[in-house]
Amino acid sequence: ALMDANETTKKRDPRVFWRGEVAAHPVKRKGYPCKSERGNHARLAALALTADDPSHFDVKCNVGCEARDATKWPCPGLAYDATMRKIYADNSSIRDPKFYTEPDYANYKYVLNLPGKTDGSYSRNLNHLWYVGAAVLLWDTPSVEWYYPALKHGATHAAVNRTTARAVVEALDASPDKYARLLAGARQRPRAHGGGVRQRLRTRAVDRLPQP
């Protein structure tokens, strides 16, 4: 699929790409499970980037898009800002029903990894992102996966959050060397920390993908 993308993609979309789900948790007898809400909050915050700045961000939900009612169920430390409240009330601007495959991800200059999952675990999603030949942006979160110690901001990925994402992207756009370093780090990371013939083959496919 990635080699097919190499044949069809002429120029990458300069925006940050993500597709996935926002799904409020079922309310329990004791109320809303706020301890499980951090991932949903991060996803809604990332969707707000698109609502604020669609020229830089193409971050949308294409599965479920039902966020927590923060007025009815407030969670400590997980308040919504003005844009998040706006898209909770009307999410039409950040919904996209289309199904995306790896060649679609390969059309973008940046791909975003958020807490939670698009398909499979955190690590599976990240491995998928590192193979599409784009710079990987990793949402800054307290959640830690077993492989995180092997990652380095500015080498394997760039860390972003609600307030820093645009500045990080603009800095990478302004510095081809820094952007190229992220691409090189994405290619090397699977070789250093992954395993198996399939990963090596997919990494070779990335080497043949179009440059931004």
Image (cartoon, rainbow, N blue to C red):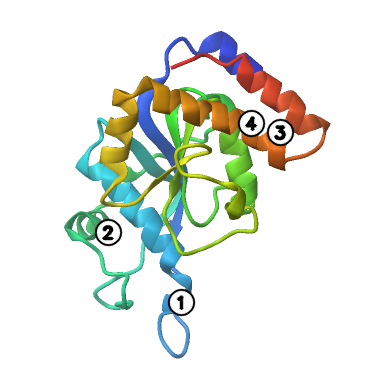
Of the numbered discs 2 and 3, the one sitting upstream in the chain is 2
Q: Residues within 10 Å of mark 3 (few under 14, many from 20)?
A: few
Which SS class for mark 2? helix
For the point 60% across and 58% down, which residue is it?
A: 145
Spatial distance from mark 1 to mark 4, Cα to Cα?
35 Å
Q: Is residue 129 visible?
A: yes
Of the numbered discs 1 and 3, the one sitting upstream in the chain is 1
Of the numbered discs 2 and 4, the one sitting upstream in the chain is 2
Amino acid type at mark 2: Tyr
Residue marked by disc 2: 88
Of the numbered discs 1 and 2, the one sitting upstream in the chain is 1
Which SS class for mark 1? helix
Residue marked by disc 1: 35
Spatial distance from mark 1 to mark 2, Cα to Cα?
20 Å
Which SS class for mark 4? helix
Amino acid type at mark 3: Arg
Of the numbered discs 1 and 4, the one sitting upstream in the chain is 1
Mark carried by residue 191: 3
Q: Residues within 10 Å of mark 2 (few under 14, many from 20)?
A: some
Callouts 3 and 4 close, C-beta under 8 Å: yes
Task: Give the image quarter of residue 11.
Answer: top left
Spatial distance from mark 3 to mark 4, Cα to Cα?
5 Å
Which SS class for mark 3? helix
Amino acid type at mark 1: Lys
70 up-or-down from 28: above or below: above
Of 125 and 74, the residue lying toward us: 125
Single out the mark in the foreground, 2 or 4.
4
